[in-house]
Image (cartoon, coloured by chain):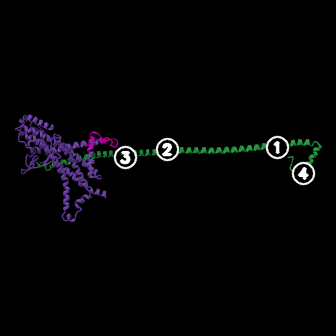
Amino acid sequence: MKPIKIILFLIVLFSWFHPLYAEDVSGRQYDDIDVGEILFGHVGDSYGWHITEWNGQHISIPLPCIVRSSSGWHCFMSSRLEHGHTYEGLYIAQEGKYEGKIVEHSQDGTEVRPFDISITKNVASLIFTAVLLIILVLLTARWYRRHDASQEGAPGGFAGLMELMIMMVNDEIIKPSVGEMHYRKYAPYLLTAFFFIFLCNLLGLVPFFPGGANVTGNIAVTMMMALFTFIAINLFADRHYWKEILWPDVPLFLKFPIPIMQTIELFGLISKPFSLMVRLFANIMAGHMMVLGLVSVIFVTVKLGPVINGSMTVIAMLFGLVINCLELLVAFIQAYVFTMLSAVFIGMAHQGDAHKEIS
Amino acid sequence: MNLMLPDTGLLFWMTIIFAIVFFILAKFGFPVITGMVEKRNKRIEDALSAARKAEDALAHLRQEQERIMDETRAEQARLLQEAASERESMMAKSRDEARIEAASIIAEARQRIQEEKESALRDVRREVAMMSVSIAEKIVRKDLATEKGQMELIDRLVSEIKEPNTPDVMN
């Protein structure tokens, strides 16, 4: 009974306060709200880092744009392109194939995309995460440099927490998945991947400034992560692994005139990192979408009247709370799954040695 | 905006940023931590095994001590028993010796008494002989003081010589 009472109380409370707010904003921005734009605007990338809106003014941090167009390199702050301004022939496309990206007019009048390595919101967030991660890990490492681990006990406080997580990933994921023989070589990469993804996921859940960017929910980021794993799997793979792909133990007609098995194996080779890429991207993306969608419910229902809007606000907030807690879990699980699967794939590329060890 | 289309700029920056992070953390971060933790774990394991060894040694020592105690106790019991039997035998032996000694002393004493007695008897006999001789002398002297006496004696002696089978009256 009690939670229901609280919810009812909140609904009534919001219904009472709402008319003032609804009058103030209704008929202006919130009447015809485009949820799709809000959602994609938040999960997508942008040239400036939009922080908030204050008295109708957008407050955003301008970020450097680095573009190589037909007229050479251009380097400027994103604030120059705000509100559809054109700078040195470059502007942000409002619609079409390159919507939201910097484009320029080519000779024949069509919009073309220049080579664009701007520090976008996601890149800035990546840099922030990278710096934070380096600081966190090096602080922990500093404790070990300053203390003689063979004389003293375990660290407490922050270093202890970091050690707990690092050793959890090292001993529970990497060691059993890669195998005792080779895990040392891959542990730094897998640990870096785990903490990088985990920190990006967590920062993505923080709704205000240094966080909030949808980094690991961006396909480019997960694609690179998957590519690194692909390299880690195949670069040091043993002969046994390549033999399984190029000349598997199957009847000859399956592999000689037409390389059927080889094609299948090749698909397997590529689908492994591909699944890693899509899994991480889709999970984090979906999480952001859900939270944003639930928040949008509050604004969408404004025109349906104060009572519905008030009650929907309470419901949306409750659901948002639940989803956010779930996303915290997902942030960890996805980092865990990415690391574990990478480790398992790497371990599979070293089975030959294991066979030799056993026999 | 296509979410499934990776952006070149982001790919570029992601590669660089992740490579830098990986380089720094793989060189100065994680190996230091995992290495130290492994070292510490090894130390703890060593300490544990050393403690186990010490415990074993202690248990062994205790066993040894127990064994030595038992041995000592057995030795003590044996020594006590030995001493008792020794005393027993010594007492028996000395008793025997004393008995033999006493017997020999008694025998000697008896013999000496016998000798003393014999010598005393011999003395007495000699004395008696001397006395009887002197008495006989005195009697003879008195008898032979007269002619008649002398003659009688001669006669008797002669008769005696004549008839040696007749028992000696004189003795």
Residue type at the position of mark 1: Arg
- Callout in the foreground (4, 3): 4
Which numbered circle lies on residue A316?
none
Magenta run includes residue A156: yes
What's the CA distance linking mark 4 and mark 1? 28 Å
Residue at 20 percent of width and 61 percent of height: A261
Q: Give the distance between the C-alpha atoms of the residues marked 3 and 1, in whole angstroms.
A: 111 Å
| Chain of residue at mark 4 | B
Extent of the magenta region: A143-165
Residue ID for mark 4: B161
Give the label on residue B49, or none.
3
Answer left or right for A357 relative to A342: right
Give me the C-alpha separation between circle 4 and circle 2. 99 Å
What element does badge 2 sit on?
helix
Gap between marks 1 and 2 measured at Cα: 78 Å
Of tags 2 and 3, the one toward the viewer is: 2
B53 relative position to A214: left or right: right
Q: Colour of chain A?
A: purple
